Amino acid sequence: MRHVTAIAGRELRSLFASPVAYAVLVLFVVLAGFFFISGLLQFQQYVIQLQMLQLSEQLQDVNLNDHVIAQFLGVMSVVLLFLVPGITMGLFAAEKANGTQELLLTSPLTIWELVLGKFLAAALFVVLLVALLSLYPGLLFWYGDPEFPKVAAGVLALLLVGLSYAAIGTFASSVTQSQLVAFFLAFVLLLILWMLGFLTELSGSAGSAPSELLRYLSSAEHFEAMVMGLVDTRDVAYFVVVVAASLILTKAVVESARWR
Amino acid sequence: MIEARGLSKRYGDLVALDDVSFSVAPGEVVGFLGPNGAGKTTTMRILTGFLPPSDGSASIAGHDIFTDPLAARRAVGYLPETPPLYPEMSVEGFLRYVARLKDVPRAARKQAVDRALSRCGLSEVRRRVIGALSKGFRQRVGLAQAIVHDPPVLVLDEPTVGLDPIQIREIRTLIRELSSGGAGEQARTVILSTHILPEVEAVCQRVMIVHRGRKVLDESLAKLREGGIGLEEIFARKTSTDAAVEEARA
């Protein structure tokens, strides 16, 4: 455990020693603010329109949770698709390119400690991102009355999605010594995982057993259920399994590099 | 202190190391010679636990690299051919990190880092960022990370490669000092690989030559001097002909 925190600590310090981490954070927060405000303005216009048309029934269905916060978190989960690979690309690839892999693998630590330390660094960065993001929906509590449990479920969904991205990014970084390759590999893997659900819809085979399986494997499916306020153990379990599987694969890759 | 028994390493069909055995006594400084691709780095990587051998085993300070890998790694300080440095870290921060990785207890860490800094002549640049250091200083940081946990065994892979003559002399002096102990440290067992034959004569007591994955010579320098043949001549004879390999095989 001491080694895990040592490795994660060094990784985070290096991340913040370069302007990259700050640039990513600023970009993310600004981008998020833009999406949030545009979502809010759209919502306002929609409400005004409904009022003018005196559609009181529809007006009752409209709320901040579903029309602003859930939408916003949905967009953010797509933004994370681009951002997290940028954070994880260097985790192992940079060590290999740097020659510091030799220091790590000749130190008295287990490969699990190494993998967990690397993942922990990426995970903490994701936690920071999500915490910054949840400030935006948090603002709405001043001016409106969104339902807290629903908001919390949405933030949890975003956090879980982000952590699963971090684990997959960690894996992608372990298979190459090029940070660029690690970035694109992670991005492609995440995109495929995200799109599996859409693919089945496009192919028109929805309902059949294989397409149901694909839907189940899609990260978007589980995210969307949760972001609407429905925290199901199955969805949580999905993300836990993705993280665990990615880290087990990473460990296998790092270990096998020794035997080649 | 170092015990290698029948080490072999194969990469597919390529035999990088073929049944190499040797033992190094405590406090001994051994020069590891051989043409490029002879198996020097492979041997060192096996001893330090970076690579597992295909066959055979080794132990460091009594700890087997297979059955007790963590203790074996704790007993070794390793300077790879390219020093494992993080350019964005400060010298001191980097050594503190390595001390943590190498299980130096928290209470002893500051002292361990200070000792490594002063032994390697780095006290003045301790707050500097590694990426901004000259090559000679970087090599010193590489040595400092190898000794920060005060290991009884040092494995140095071409420690003077790419340095200018003055830096080479400084590093050699440093290696001699590190091997002889003193300043509250134990005497260390050292294996170092090099292409520079005078380097062996300058710092080592014993020389080992590998060629095409086999050990073709293992002799003390004093003995070789008695024979009256220069090291260069011996090296040429042992590595230029296949006869040497055949001889070793017989």
Image (cartoon, rainbow, N blue to C red):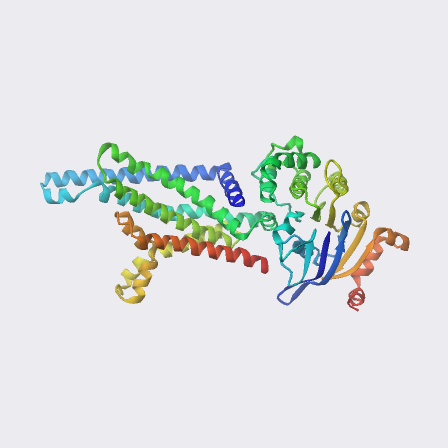
Compared across the picture, whether A257 is left or right of A73 comes to: right
Looking at the figure, which quarter contains the C terminus of chain A? bottom right
How far across and down, in percent of the image, does residue B238 sit? 81, 60
Q: Quadrant for residue B99, please give it.
A: top right
How far across and down, in percent of the image, does residue A8 sit? 50, 43
How far across and down, in percent of the image, does residue A66 sit? 23, 45
Residue A220 visible in the picture: no
Q: How many badges with numbers are in the image? A: 0
Q: Is residue B194 above or below residue B17?
A: above
Q: In this view, does A213 lie above or below A25?
A: below
Furthest residue in direction top, as rendered: B124
Compared across the picture, whether A164 is left or right of B64 comes to: left
Q: Which of B221 and B229 is in front in this view?
A: B221
Residue at position x 81%, y 66% from top? B247
Residue A131 visible in the picture: yes
How far across and down, in percent of the image, does residue A249 sit? 47, 57
Q: Which of A90 and B240 is in front in this view?
A: A90
Compared across the picture, whether B165 is left or right of A222 comes to: right
Furthest residue in direction bottom, as rendered: B250
Residue at position x 83%, y 57% from top? B234
